[in-house]
Image (cartoon, rainbow, N blue to C red):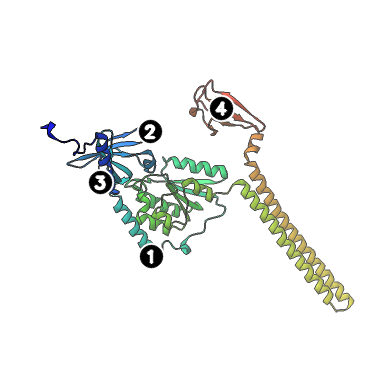
Amino acid sequence: MINDFNSAEIKIFSITEINKLVKQLLQDNFPTIWVKGEISNFIEASSGHWYFSLKDNNAQVRCTMFKGQNNEVKRIPKNGDMIEAQCKIGLYEQRGDYQLNISSLQQAGLGKLFEEFNLLKQKLDKEGLFDDHYKKTLPSYPNTIGIITSPDAAVLRDIIITLKRRNKSLKIIIYPTPVQGQAAPKGIIDAIKIANQRNEVDVLILCRGGGSIEDLWSFNEELVARQIFSSKLPIITGVGHQTDITISDFVSDLRAATPTAAAEIISSSHEELIGSLEYFESNLTNIIQHKIDELNQKIDLLEKGLLSPAQKIMIQYDLIIGFKNRIQMAINSQLQKYQEQIKSYKQNLNYLNPNEILARGYSIVLNQNKKIINKASVLNLSDKIKIKFYEGNVEANITKINQDKES
């Protein structure tokens, strides 16, 4: 009977106490573990936390992954994904529900991909494909740059903008190829071969934006790596984000942290070019002047060493003076030629200066994000724009949009 027990001898727990005790037992007895299962009932809360269930054929369990942990996940999972998750077993005390608190997750099978990555890396490294003495020197001032990437990639526009911002005279040739999926490895290999056969660029940028390890796997294929290594044209890789490292990065001539960084590395700005030209001009002038001084010194020594009769001395003297004058004229002519070339280069560079273009009556239209507007189709009525002139700027609101180029 319920009235027969002695309450003084029996410990009676509250529900709160029981839940706290069970939670503590779970935390103390189950260290961090890895589980594998299929995601279902996935919810991304407004707080940024993720709530979902993991299931197999016979059971399921609730899971939580808080914002601080899921920020590191490159791709938001979806229902039906098979994942491997690092977690601790916990208890939600208010409901008495036990759950898995996820600290990290990855697509199931990534362990095999990492194993393949390391095996190929060791193989190619042993063959010497990563050795520095095989790395080709990048051109200091390339005239034409080739880009190997998807024509639909957003990163392509970023690279072109960066290159043109730094040097408007650069020529750009795009070698389109898929950079993700089954067709990507062959497409990348063919693009490198075509670029080498045509030999129309000074350097190649092989790039794509960020993604999961599966998205970037084409750049870990052995045949792609070997084609990069065998390229006669120097290749810069800019694949994914700074933390993404691929086999292609090891065999390329230079690895950039991002595609945009690759564009920055290979292009020289107008200011850098002008500075280099001024340095070359000064250096060339010093070399020529040193040569003139050296020849004058030789002539002086010859004059002092002449012990012939007076007439012979005069003849030799005239010959020497004539020789000296011809040398001086030739050197001056060559110096003037180089100075005129340098002046021409400076004028061409200054002509491309945005401020010089504005001075000729053109203007630059910027949106509220300070991005350049080059077509009416990207504007909407009531948009605010800024129009920059050679001297000063004005702000305006869009009241009418005309798509006709001739208007």
Mark 3: which amino acid? Answer: Lys
Tag 1 secondary structure: helix
Tag 3 secondary structure: strand
Depth-wise, is mark 4 or mark 2 nearer the camera? 2
Q: Count neighbours of disc 3 (C-alpha within 10 A) and say few if under 14, some if 14 to 19, many if 20 or more.
A: some
Choose the circle earlier in sequence order: 4 or 2: 2
Labelled pair 1, 3 in contact (Cβ < 8 Å): no
Distance from label 4 to label 2 (Cα)? 35 Å
Labelled pair 3, 2 in contact (Cβ < 8 Å): no
Q: Nearer the viewer, residue 238 or 81?
A: 81
Choose the circle earlier in sequence order: 3 or 4: 3
Q: Count neighbours of disc 1 (C-alpha within 10 A) and say few if under 14, some if 14 to 19, many if 20 or more.
A: few
Disc on res. 385: 4
Residue matched to label 1: 127
Labelled pair 4, 2 in contact (Cβ < 8 Å): no
Compared to residue 79, the image places residue 301 above or below, namely below
Where residue 188 sits in the image (x, y, percent)? Answer: 39, 50
State the image quarter where residue 65 is shown. Answer: top left
Mark 2: which amino acid? Answer: Ser
Depth-wise, is mark 3 or mark 4 nearer the camera? 3
Where residue 349 sits in the image (x, y, percent)? Answer: 64, 45
Residue matched to label 3: 36
Q: Nearer the viewer, residue 159 or 403?
A: 159
Image side of residue 277 versus residue 168, left or right: right
Distance from label 3 to label 4 (Cα)? 53 Å
